[in-house]
Each structure stands twice: as structure tokens, then as C-alpha cells.
Amino acid sequence: MTSTSFHVRRGQRSWRGIIVAALSVGVLVLPACAGSRVAGEKEQQGNSSGASSGTIPVLNLATESDAAMGSLVSYNPFAPQQTVRTWLFEPLMQQSSLDCKVVPWLATGYTWESPSKLVFTIRQGVKWSDGSPFTAKDVAFTYNLTKKYPAIDLAGVWNDSFGAKAKSVTADGDKVTFEFEGPAVTKFPYLIGQKIVSEKEFASVGDPAKYISKNPISTGPFKVASYNGRRLELERRPDYWQADKIKVQKLVLEGNYSTNANQAAAKLKTGELDFYSGEIPNPDKAFVADDPKTNHVWYAANGLTVLAPNLTQKPFSDVKFREALAHGMDKQSATDKATYGLMKVASQSGLPLPEKDDLLPAKYPADSTVIPFDLAKANQMLDAAGYRKGSNGLRQDTDGSPIKITFSVQAGWIDYEAMADELTSNFRKLGLDITENKMPPEAVDQQKKTGDFQLMINYMGAGCDYAHGMGATVSTAEIPDKTTIKGNIGRYTNPAVDKAIGALAGATDEAATKEQVGVLVDAMMTDYPVLPILYAPARAIWRTDHAVGWPTAEDPYANPQDQPLVWITHLTAPSSK
Amino acid sequence: MRYFVRKIGFFVLTLWAVVTLNFLIPRLQPGDPAELMVQNLAGKNAQLNRAQVEAMRDLLGAPSGSLLSQYWNYLVQLIHGNLGVSYTYFPYTVAEVIGKAFWWTVILVGTVQVLSFAIGILLGAFAAWRRNSRFDTSVTVISTFVGTLQPFWIALLLIYGLGYGLGWFPTAGGYQASTPGFNGAFVYDAMSHAFLPALTLMIVTPIGWILGMRNTMIMNLGEDYIRLARAKGLPDRMIALRYAARNALLPSVAGFALALGGILGGTILVETVFDYPGLGRLMGEAVGIKDYPLLQGLMLLTAVATLLANLIADLLYGILDPRARRAAA
């Protein structure tokens, strides 16, 4: 099974894992059989693409959530799931989690007047889809709406999730001012992502969470043309504020394939789908190999998958033991098995490299932070630290008691299982008595809360809020409690790190940020609170026969998965064949 | 009369047990629905966003009060026909969501069940009548073989062959370009999309009926009344259809009622493979996303349908077969 499928979308479903694995067997059989019906559709598309030069007549994309019961439509951007939100509603600014560059959007600029006061300049000349002008008042209205209804405050502006709470959001002319109760710089990446809605539509609808929006008023590049409950057609808005950059005339969204990624693979192959960011098993083989000129894949490093020991338990409480493990992990082999070589081995620094090379303190050259696999060295370190082998060939604790390690593994997350299998066999070679306990992901989550585990695989955030991204794994405040999963499942505590994380909330310039991130990197490199295995991806799988200009590894101008609005403005028609 | 009262009493008791289990099971599951929802939306390669979890908790509303009072509220809601609000399709209610999927499955699987039953009974009866003939052997062997295949595997083969290979039928969804409603284009669209799932099910479902019918029929053929009928010189066809088949049908009728009840939950994999907008697919989705209210609604619907079908079968049986009535009394 592991060889056919390593991704299970939204993994929390072991039975679905079984289906996906079984279906993957199916998709390996499917390649290269464009049926006549499919070919017919393709031809239609081909014909119309020659019509007017430079424009892209149609682009086929996936919907944003499962639309099994699509006719229950709501275009309310505050609903937990909807068919489309990206193409209709826009945020103030866009920040790529890969390089943290800020792209102005509905706001043209921002300044932190102090770590607790943020001022945006709102773009002029933007029109809502009903023709009325978009103003700073709409922006202030949106944020204040999320204050009144905490259920829609997805950016956490009004609570202390990622920094101090907001006190007020006010509009004045073309400025919108956020005032916080304390330093809140770390809130920025979340705050700018809030989709802005119009006061006209939302002022009178009551609880916006429960509002069903059939005729949305939005600022985005597209508006709804037709929807029959399955196939959603969006048409380009000629009055969009950067309409000159939108070459795509029509978007067709049909299905999101989350229950069946193989449908997506098949549609990508036949040209019925132009871009997909879901999890297709082994996309290189299942898709790209078919036609490497047209079919492309780029998995950008967007976070880290790490091995997380429970630092409150022996022998993991000993930093020397953890350091030895870091050298005894065949990360390359684990990465190849889990991701078919699409991702790279992760750096011990906790930063996705090379994207975030700039943030590394000078004393850690980027190459030196990836710890090479060296069993002999790991054995040597364990010996030196006093973990000697007993008569049964298994290592014992420094006091001579036996070591027995249980590795909690999320069953059905096939890439995690592949990593766990590889690491377990590595550790056995070190003479450690380790067994895997595969259990439902919810049960693993439960162990994160209770702290009743020894070893597991966890995700370590990256992103641009270092305090709550990579910081979440090492901050004392992020130790999970009985009711809430948080990032620091290993229960690591370090006052210097906590201080740095606190300081990040007030760091409004890059030098200050780099200094504090340096403290976190230092902790990662010397304390080994977690052992990074590989980088977790932001995924993009796309075709270039209808449109070109997608973000790629060579030109990573956007996070392909999170920033479709950015790449849609870069797309152009392919030059004539 | 006692027979009917007993059966209805049993029905009510089972229904209560089902409702209670339905209430308890989600509450025994590990995991916080809000955390699960947020993680599901973000995917596993994403950090749990605390602000979103907070908002989601607020949105879904945490259950309050003791377990007993929650149970009471649940019962009161149920009696009012209120199944709650779906997490996934928020703010649509569970009843609305199920209502959308209901007819897709009922029409597809209902048709398939009725056809399968008819075909299965006929083939089974004929095979038993012509026992050990070439027809009997091939029907039995093929049925036994096909019966070991998983429906979703057959579905994949059909998608590959008839969908992608020959391009005759669409492979995903319930309809595509037409507008739902009672119009020619939509009916055609829906039927062409339903063809492959229906074919998949038609390959598998008759098998139970074929083998079951064949076996009961063979047993019946050994009975004395058949011998008597033969001795009287009745024509073969009459003995086969009016005597043996009629009696052999009795157990199958009860089974058929159960199968009709089981329509709602029985096609999760096939509907998922075909992305068919029915109840099975919905249930798969609800399980995956841990949409407890939706899942509870679907389980309840399935259980009630099965129980009702069972009750009707029991009552019918009592009318059809006086022995059952007497034995139970």
C-alpha cells in the first residue's frame, strides 16, 4: 500500500485511507486513456482558445470544498465551507508563507506606527460587483462584524490568539487603523487575510454565520455566472480593479475531489482540470511522466514534519539521547519513501531552507543544519552518554533499567506511516527496543493533549508569524492542555525562547525579527526539542496548455496553494502553437 | 392480534435503543469536533489555527448541561423532527442536507434493488428447477465468483473500461451541464450519470437473491406436496411457478424488505467512487469529516428505515403465512 499512495487528503479517516490506497491501485491503471467523450470536450476548448489572442477562454479548477450537495449553496465567506470564496472575496494584503513578501491588495500599504497600532491605506477606485464603490468604511465594518460575532473571527483579531487583542478598528478617509491592547505584530499574517465584505450586504443580515448568501456582493476578479448545483461558472469582471491583469475569461469549478484524488488525477491528464493542489499519490509518475512538457508539479517547502519526543519522559528528557537520535535517522530514505522524493530532508534549524536562509544566524551555515545520517556516530554518542547495550543487545538507560519505546503513529496517514516505519527500523539498528503503535489520528491527538506518549510525528509550522509558526513547537505557552491541542507537544521549556517569542510580537522590523528567530534556531540546534524529518509541502499540480505563468520552483512568486488570487493575475495564454 | 402487538412493541423498543446509541456514540468519540473541523479544512500539513478553533467552537456551540439533560433535549428535538445543523453544510440543517441526497439514492438503489430482486428470483428459481443442468452450473459458479468481488472494485473496472476507455458514460457526479428539474435534458443527464453506478450494483446485488432462491426452491422441490402435484399430472411450468417458487419466495420477501431498508446505508463505497450525490457518499463524507449531527441524522434514517421495513415484513409475513402468526402467539 505504501508504494501506491502517501497522501490521504485531510487524513483523519482510516477507512478512507483504505479506499484511497485501493483506488490508487486503480489510478495506476488509468493513465493515458483519454476517452472519446473527454476528447470531444478537449477539442471544444482547443477551438475557442484561438479566438482572441492573449486571453484564456476557460480555466477548469476545483471547488474549494466538497460540493456533494452543491445545490445547498451559500456564497457567504464566513461559512465554514463553501464552493467558492477565493475568486469572489479579497483580503487587504497577501503574504506568501514561503518568502513572507507582502503583496498589496485591497490595501496599498501598511505601517506599524507602534507595535500596538497598525494603519492600512485602502486602495481607491475599487468597485463592488454591484457597481457601488468600495471604501475604508467597508473594511472597518468587516473587522467590527467579526468583533460582534466571535464565531466568524477566523483571523483572531479580537482575542489573544496570536498577539494582543484589538481594541478598535476605525476608518478615516482612506486609512483604517487597528489599535491593540499590547504588542500585536505577530497577528499580521492572519489579520491581513480576512476576506472583506460589503456593509451593504452584511449590515442587515443578522448573525452573519447563519446567513445564506445567494447573491454575493464582492470585490474579486470574478462573479457567479451560473451554477446548477454541480458546475459553477464564474465570469471575469470587466470592472475589476486590476482587470487588465486578468486574462482568464471564465472559470469552471466542478467538484473538489477530496474524497477521490484519483478523479482529479484523471481529469488533469485529460485536460479537464488545469490546476489542483490536493494530494495525488506520486504525481510525478501519475501525471507529469505522461507529458512532461505540459504537465507540471511543484511541491514547495511550507513547514516541517518532525519527530517529536516527549521530553518529560526518560530517556527523551536527556538532550544527549535526542542528539544521538538526530544522527541516527535516515531522513533521506524516510523522505523518499514518504514523498516519492518530491520533498527534501529538513534542516534541524526548524526553518524551511533555502527559502528562509536569510533568517539563519551567521554561525549556522545553511548546509550544516541538515544533520546527515550516521549510524556509527549515533551509536558512539549513545555509548558516550551512558546508554550501554545490555546482555540482550538492547540499550539500557543510564541507570541500567531497560528502555522501551512506543512510537504513536497516525494510522491511515500513509506518508506518516512510511516515515515511522523507516525511523523505527533505524532506531532498532541503534539497539533501541522500539515498537510502533498505529492508532486513529484522533487517538494520537488525544495523546497530544494528555501528554501520555513517548514519541510521535508532528507538524511544525513555518509561515511568517515565527512566534506562533515555528515558535509554537518550542514555546512554553504552547504546551497543550486537556482540552486544546497546541504545538509544543513535547513539553519543551526554555526561558530564553519564551522571551524571544514575546519579543517577536513587538518586532516591527526585519533585523529585530531575525535576532529573535535566531534564538529559536539556537534552541533547535542545541537542545533538539524536536527532530525535523522533511519539509511538508504547499502543493501545485498544473497544466500549461491553456494558461502559462504559474508559480514554479524557478519562479516562486506565490504560494501556489494559498495564493490563487496572486497567480491568476500572472496567467497568460500560451504563445500560439 | 398478539403477534402484531408484539412486533410493534419490539419495533418501538429497538427504535429507542437505536436513538440512544445514536446519541451516545458520537459523545464517546475522542477528539473535539471544532478542532477536527479546522484540521480537516486545513489538511494535516498545517498547524491547528487556534483562532479558527475558537471561532468554530463558538459557531458549533458546545453542548451544555449534564449528559442526562442533553439526552432529554435530544429526544425532544427528535420528536419535533429537528435533526440539528450540519457542521459541514453550516448553516443548512441536517434535514435539508439529507433531503437533497435522499432521492438520488432512493431512485438509483431502489430501482436496482427491485430489478435485482426480480432477476435474482427468476434466475434462482429456474436454476433450481433445472438443477445440475449447464444453466444451473454456470449461474451458480458465476454468482459465487462475482459474489467475492468488491463492488467498488467492479466500479473501478467499469470506470476504466466504459468511462475512460470507450468514453460512453460519464464517470463522476449525478449530473453535469443541465439544470435540475423535471425536464428532458436533466433526466437524460441524470440517467447517463446513474448508468455506471447502477450497472455496478446490478452486477452484485442479484447474487444473494439468485443463490438464496435457488437453495430454498431446491428444498421445496423435495417436499411431498410437489410429489403430489407431479402425481396429479400437473404441467411442469405450473408446479415450478405456482407451487415451488411461490413457497420458496416467502423467505426472500422478508429479505427484500430488509434490503429496501438497507438501501440508505449500503452504497457508501460505490457512491464515493462515482462521486454520486446520494446518501452513501454523504455518509462517507460525514464519517470522514466527523460531522456528527449529519452522521447522527443519517444513522437514524438508516436505522428507522431498516426497522420500519422489518416491521412491515413481519406484519406482511403474519398475513401471508398463518404459521408465523401461530408460532409467535
Image (cartoon, coloured by chain):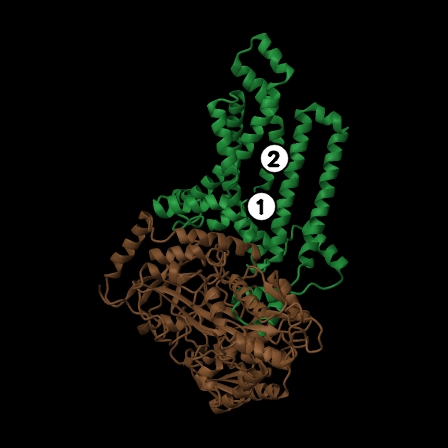
Disc marking residue B206: none
Residue at image point 35% right, 57% down: A269
**How many C-alpha atoms fall within 10 Å of the one at disc 1: few (<14), some, or many (≥20)?**
many
Colour that chain A carries in the picture: brown
Q: Quadrant of the C terminus of chain A?
A: bottom left
Image marks 1 and 2: residues in contact by CB distance under 8 Å: no
What's under tag 2, amino acid-wise? Ala
Which chain does the green colour mark?
A: B
Q: Residue furthest front?
A: A391
Asked which secondary structure carries label 2, the reply is helix
Q: Is residue A530 left or right of residue B162?
A: right
User: Which residue is pictured at 64% across the width and 48% down the height?
Assistant: B300
Instruction: Give x and y (percent) for residue A557.
Output: 37, 76
Q: Quadrant of residue B261?
A: top right
Vertical side of B247 occupied by A473: above or below:
below
Q: The numbered mark 1 sits on a residue in which chain?
A: B
Q: Which residue is mark 1?
A: B265
Q: Residue furthest top?
A: B232
Residue A28 in percent (x, y) is at 41, 54
B302 relative position to A77: left or right: right
Q: Is residue A79 visible?
A: no
Q: How many marks?
A: 2
Query: Circle 2 is placed at which residue position?
Result: B257
Chain hosting mark 2? B
Towards the viewer: A355 or B36: A355
For marks 1 and 2 on the same chain, the one whose residue lies earlier in the sequence? 2
| Three-letter amino acid code of the residue under disc 1 | Gly
